[in-house]
């Protein structure tokens, strides 16, 4: 029996197995295995063999130094009581031994590899006597195994807690970073909508746009990685055409490739190939690889995107003639925070992009492989994904909401404690012909809403005085609020956040920084002809 990664829920049956082995070795019919309590001032029963529930109920907790087990724990040495009736040390517990029916006890401390005492293993014999040296060695071996298992389980618990804390930190970081991105994006869009700027100002706006998009992608990557490692990322799987996956990826990455001055060649199969997957996530995978290739290929270089059928799989290959991957880095290229290139000429990101790609591919039942002859010789990434049978009939129709504002102005209330975010979004929506009011806390939002009677409320979640969830619930309960469309605009974007906003009555859940064009398109669909569809549960973006 050897130690392995162990969940705490598995610990008790394994400790009972070790305890039985120790008891059999000394020809004993019962045993107890205690573990150190959180404060290490006492011992708690973790496994028991041969004792009835009445006896166990009388000894749920044992102080350090109490009895043979407490003494072994406190003094970090084996304690042997050859005869409970004759040993003066055992006098305080003699009556207890009589009730339980044992006459000798052998207690061994559980010393971990780090030197800590994790607990005590004790075997109880019906007759007086001293264990042989062979018996002592066998019990010592069992004690070492038990110590390893206990330490292993505690380390696993610590790792899980650290991972949970990390995921919470990443989610909070993503939220906090999104808040300042929202007004920046709105302000840039406003400048684009005004009179044509000078070439210099236009160039500056394009720089801000590109860098803001890059910042948003980094924030999204952080959050996606946290979702995957926390098993909270859900794929929206459906039959998707491979060509559509690649089209979306190219559309996303083309600006970076063109700006980098690279030749870009795309080769697609003539036949229509279908995957069972999440269109957004699959295109994200390919786009991340294309962006990576553009980042590490010198101006004038070449990037190739190829796709083909290989048996029952589709293969997608992204190939470049850039700076390549050192051979010693290839086995670790998909590990989190691994960065193959660190130099002023080739600035690196967070080292999570390829980890995210690999996890998403595996969630789709596929594989990904990295190849490179070495530094300076280019690189190649090959994805294999299982194909599904002809599924064109099952594909959902591509219904796109027109981006043109339908002409009917809307009364829109914007609520955000970030005044820049509220003001910039308000100005943007006012430029498209709407009547706008703003509020900056939950109580003020209710007051303004009752007075203004908006058609739409764009509502932040993390508000002072009253959070957005409660504001939404109160608006919907009010006699004047039944027909108001509620849009959550927040930095919190995990599935649990979307679920909570739906339960609170929101019709849409948008994650900061919201694409202004997408928001205007959504507003246009709300203001469009025909009756409004209320309580569109599950709608999100």
Image: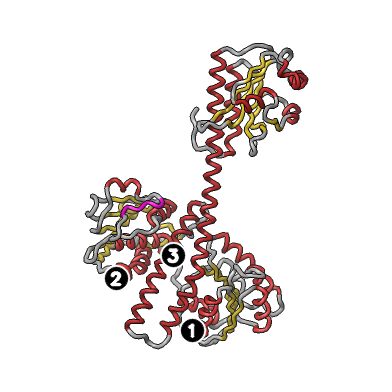
Q: Earlier in the sequence, mark 3 or mark 2?
A: 2
CB within 8 Å, label 2 to label 1: no
* Rendered image quadrant of residue 328: top left
Q: Is residue 269 visible?
A: no
Q: Is residue 456 visible?
A: yes
Q: Few, some or many C-alpha atoms within 10 Å of disc 2 (few <14, some 14-19, many ≥20)? A: few
Q: Which residue is mark 2?
A: 259
Question: Which circle marks residue 301 in the picture?
Answer: none
Q: Is residue 159 left or right of residue 447?
A: left
Q: Nearer the viewer, mark 3 or mark 1?
A: 1
Q: Which residue is mark 1?
A: 405
185 lies above or below 146: below
Q: Few, some or many C-alpha atoms within 10 Å of disc 1 (few <14, some 14-19, many ≥20)? A: some
CB within 8 Å, label 3 to label 1: no
In x, y percent, where is residue 503? Answer: 63, 65
Q: Is residue 466 left or right of residue 175?
A: right
Q: Earlier in the sequence, mark 2 or mark 1?
A: 2
CA separation, marks 2 and 1? 32 Å
Q: Which residue is mark 3?
A: 395
């Amino acid at each position: 029996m050897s130690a392995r990664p162990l969940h705490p829920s598995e610990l008790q049956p394994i400790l009972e197995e070790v305890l039985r082995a120790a008891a059999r070795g000394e020809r004993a019919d019962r045993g107890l295995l205690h573990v150190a309590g959180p404060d290490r001032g006492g011992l708690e029963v973790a496994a028991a063999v041969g004792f009835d529930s009445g006896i166990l109920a009388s000894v749920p907790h044992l102080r350090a130094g109490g009895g043979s087990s407490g003494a072994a724990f406190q003094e970090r040495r084996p304690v042997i009581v050859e005869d409970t009736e004759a040993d003066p040390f055992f006098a305080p517990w003699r009556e207890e031994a009589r009730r339980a029916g044992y006459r000798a006890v052998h207690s061994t401390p559980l010393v971990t590899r780090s030197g800590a005492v994790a607990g005590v293993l004790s075997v109880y014999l019906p007759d007086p006597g001293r264990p042989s040296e062979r018996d002592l060695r066998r019990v010592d071996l069992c004690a070492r195994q038990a110590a390893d298992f206990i330490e292993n389980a505690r380390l696993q618990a610590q790792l899980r807690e650290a991972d949970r804390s990390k995921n919470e930190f990443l989610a909070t970081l993503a939220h906090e970073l999104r808040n300042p991105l929202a007004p920046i994006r709105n302000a840039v869009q406003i400048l684009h909508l005004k009179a044509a700027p000078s070439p210099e100002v236009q160039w500056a706006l394009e720089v801000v746009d590109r860098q803001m998009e890059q910042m948003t992608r980094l924030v999204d990557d952080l959050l996606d990685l946290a979702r995957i490692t926390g098993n909270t990322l859900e794929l929206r799987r459906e039959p998707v055409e491979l060509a559509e996956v690649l089209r979306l990826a190219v559309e996303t990455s083309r600006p970076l490739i063109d700006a980098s001055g690279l030749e870009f060649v795309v080769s697609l199969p003539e036949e229509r190939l279908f995957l069972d997957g999440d269109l957004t996530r699959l295109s994200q995978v390919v786009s991340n690889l294309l962006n990576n290739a553009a980042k590490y290929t010198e101006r004038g270089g070449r990037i190739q995107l190829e796709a083909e059928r290989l048996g029952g799989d589709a293969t997608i290959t992204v190939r470049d003639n850039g700076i390549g991957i050192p051979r010693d880095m290839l086995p670790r290229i998909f590990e989190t925070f691994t960065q193959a290139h660190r130099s002023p000429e080739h600035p690196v990101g967070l080292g999570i992009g390829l980890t995210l790609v690999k996890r998403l591919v595996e969630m789709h039942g596929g594989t990904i492989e990295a190849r490179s002859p070495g530094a300076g010789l280019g690189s190649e990434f090959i994805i294999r994904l299982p194909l599904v049978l002809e599924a064109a009939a099952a594909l959902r129709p591509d219904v796109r909401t027109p981006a043109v504002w339908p002409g009917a102005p809307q009364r829109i209330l914007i609520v955000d404690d970030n005044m820049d975010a509220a003001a910039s979004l308000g100005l943007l929506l006012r430029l498209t012909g709407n009547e706008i009011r703003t509020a900056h806390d939950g109580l003020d939002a209710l007051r303004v809403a009752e007075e203004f009677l908006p058609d739409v409320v764009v509502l932040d979640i993390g508000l002072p005085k009253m959070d957005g969830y409660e504001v939404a619930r109160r608006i919907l309960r009010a006699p004047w609020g039944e027909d108001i469309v509620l849009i959550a605009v927040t930095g919190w974007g995990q599935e649990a956040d979307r679920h909570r906003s739906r339960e609170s009555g929101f019709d849409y859940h948008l994650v900061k920084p919201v694409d202004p064009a997408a928001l205007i398109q959504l507003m246009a669909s709300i203001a469009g002809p025909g009756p409004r569809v209320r309580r569109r549960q599950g709608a999100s973006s």
